[in-house]
Image (cartoon, rainbow, N blue to C red):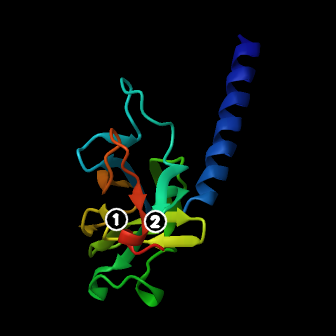
Amino acid sequence: MQRLTTTWVSSLAGNVVLAASLGACANVDSGVVELNWAFVDRDGDAIFPAGQFSAGRGDACDQPGRIGADEVSVDLEVQLDICDSDCAGSCDGDCQIVPPERAGCDAYRTTITDVPASARPYLFLLRAIVVTPTGDCVAPSGCFAVPGPRERTVTRGLVTDLQVLQIVVDVDTEGDDVLDLEACGCA
């Protein structure tokens, strides 16, 4: 019995130290924001993530594109901006609550920790980004349909889930269609 009690007390002490350590790292006045997205073509067919029963791609990297007559590979990425709702959609500089969160072409979800809690809703802007051989093209409206801004309140200690957002890419994955970067304004 003595050995069992000693083991239990040692285990309890270790858990208390671990909990205190983790608590010291967390910002008690913040919340967490989660975002999931899916790239689909103009017919609604999945580009990435493709789903459990689809023979789709494993990422949104090296997508076929075109600049004039030249074929190029492009990466499709997203960026989430969290802004003060009083800024009316211009999310930069002093309007940003946290630095923009940019996810690579191999991701379809992201979690942003330490977002300051607020009594008023923030404005969440999702931007599509095309990484081309000549640079990044942010929010090309000629080739993407991106959901509009969402307002959500971030509650201290809780997760704010922005749900799964679909980004429609103006291509047909079942045809010979590729992303025309000139039409997008990215060339």
Relative placement, left or right, of 64 versus 14 is left
Examine the rendered structure and indicate whether residue 95 appears above or below residue 169: below
Label for residue 129?
2
In the foreground, 63 or 68:
68
Tell me residue 95's x, y (percent). Answer: 40, 85
Residue at horizontal 38%, vertical 43%? 47
* Three-letter code for the amino acid on which mark 2 is drawn: Ile
Q: Is residue 4 left or right of residue 138?
A: right
Tell me whether circle 1 and circle 2 mark residues in contact (CB < 8 Å): no
Q: Which residue does the numbered mark 1 point to in the structure image?
A: 154
- Mark 2 or mark 1, which is nearer the start of the sequence? 2
SS for tag 2?
A: strand
Q: Looking at the figure, which quarter contains the N terminus?
A: top right
Question: Who's the residue at 24% across and 67% down the image?
Answer: 148
Residue 180 percent coordinates (x, y): 40, 62
Query: Where residue 187 appears, x then y in whole percent?
Result: 48, 74
In the picture, measured across the screen, residue 84 lies left or right of residue 12, that is left
Q: Determine whether 169 is above or below 153 in the image.
A: above
Q: Mark 1 or mark 2: which is in front?
A: 2
